[in-house]
Amino acid sequence: MDSAVEAVYDDLDQHMAHERDIAAAAMPMGLLLAWTANLQLLDESRVSALAPNAERLLLRIRYREVKGSELLIAIGGSLRRELFTPAGQTFLDDYYEQYLADLGTLFGPDIYGLAESWDNYDILAKHLTARLMASRGIGVARRPLLSRIRGYFSRVFNP
């Protein structure tokens, strides 16, 4: 994605064209927004500038009291690039175009029928975190080292 040209990753209006129910339309972006909030990939000062209650909503998301879609609505319904930290921007620049397809792969083709539940969030968060770590080169290179360490301890303690 060319960040100079594309300053918006997604917008609620685009989803409303596919789904008339605002809660269902907000769900895909809400799940992602909750994940970015939990991994501190949101620039909280920029988010707070858009919604006076953003700090409270972010805390309530972390305690799983509210859903990410509530924050999405509070900030105007758009996932704008400037709302994310540099690390969040880097990840989303490379990944966001694949996000909806990944939702379909994980949960089935009717992504708007998916509940914005914390159980579904946990499934998605595991996938997104793996993608984030892979984009940073973490995970792939560390596995051989972990395997060698396990092998060493296995030989030492189980001769």
Image: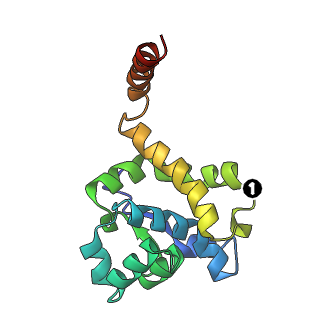
Where is residue 22, by image quadrant? bottom right
Q: Amino acid at mark 1?
A: Pro
Classed neighbour count for the residue bearing mark 1: other residues with Cα under 10 Å, few (<14), some (14–19), many (≥20): some
Q: Residue 58, image x and y in percent? A: 38, 76
Q: Return the x and y of residue 104 as percentages of the image width and height.
A: 68, 53
Q: Specify the farthest residue to the bottom.
A: 52
In terms of depth relative to the viewer, which is nearer, 76 or 157? 157
Pinpoint residue 115: horizontal percent, then vertical percent: 68, 70
Instruction: Choose between 85 and 20: the one closer to the eye.
Output: 85
Q: Is residue 31 left or right of residue 132?
A: right
In the picture of the structure, the residue carrying the numbered disc 1 is 109
Q: Is residue 97 visible?
A: no
Picture residue at 70% right of the left edge, 55% below the top: 107
Residue 124 seen in the current view = yes
Q: Quadrant for residue 143, please give it.
A: top left
Q: Residue at x 63, y 55 (%)?
A: 103
Label 1: element kind: loop
Residue 107 in the image: above or below residue 25? above
Residue occupying image coordinates x 70% and y 66%: 114
